[in-house]
Image: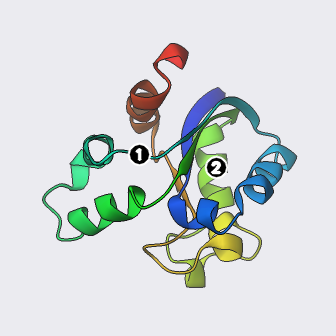
Amino acid sequence: MMQTTFAIIKPDATLAKHTGKIIDLIEKEGFEVVGLKKVHMTQAKAEEFYAVHNARPFFGELVSFMTSGPCVLLALRKENAIAAWRDLMGATDPAKAAPNTMRALFGTNVGSNATHGSDAPETAQTELKLFFPELV
C-alpha cells in the first residue's frame, strides 16, 4: 500500500552536515520526497510536536535538543513507507542499530540519534498535518 510518512533529520545530523547524505540514502531506498522544509523549530512548535511526552522526565531536554539547531522536515512516499522508513532509521540507540541504518551511520547516542519517523498511520497523519498540512 502506498503511504506517506513524516521524517525529521534532527539538529545533531544537520549541524554535522549529514543532511545531503541522509537524503541521498532516502532516495536510493526508493522513497519519493514529496515535502521538504528546513526549519529552526520554535519551543512552542517542539512542545506541540512532542506533547505526547510532556509528562515524561526527558521532555524538557528533548524540546531543548530539537530547538538547538535547524531540522529538515520531510514527507516521504513509498509502498509501506512507515515501516520502510523505520527500518531504514534503525534502532533508537545508534549502538544497537543495524549496520547501514541512519542511526548507525549518523547517530551518536539515544538522545542524538539523527532522525525521527512516524510510528503508525495515525501518527504520520498527525505529524504531517502539523508541518505539511497541504499534503493531508
> Which amino acid, by three-letter code, is at mark 1?
Met
Mark 2 crowdedness (10 Å alpha carbons): few <14, some 14-19, many ≥20: many
The front one of 136 and 91 is: 136
Q: Quadrant location of residue 75?
A: top right
Local secondary structure at mark 2: helix
Q: Quadrant location of residue 59?
A: bottom left
Image coords of residue 107 (percent x, y)? 60, 73
Image quadrant where one finds the N terminus: top right
Q: Residue furthest bottom?
A: 95
Image coords of residue 63 (percent x, y)? 30, 58
Image coords of residue 66 (percent x, y)? 40, 57
> Height in image: 102 above or below 107?
above
Where does label 2 land, which residue?
85
- What number is the disc on residue 102? none
In the rendered view, does 93 fall on the left or right side of 127? Answer: right
Task: Please name the residue shown 75% across and 49% down the image.
Answer: 23
> Which amino acid, by three-letter code, is at mark 2?
Trp
The front one of 80 and 125 is: 125
> Height in image: 28 above or below 62?
above
Mark 1 crowdedness (10 Å alpha carbons): few <14, some 14-19, many ≥20: many
Q: Residue furthest right?
A: 28
Where does label 1 land, which residue?
41
Task: Please name the residue shown 68% across and 58% down the image.
Answer: 88
> Height in image: 134 above or below 20?
above
The front one of 34 and 1 is: 34
Task: Please name the residue shown 12% across and 59% down the image.
Answer: 55
Image coords of residue 64 (percent x, y)? 31, 63
Local secondary structure at mark 1: loop
Separation of marks 2 and 1 at Cα, in angstroms:
22 Å
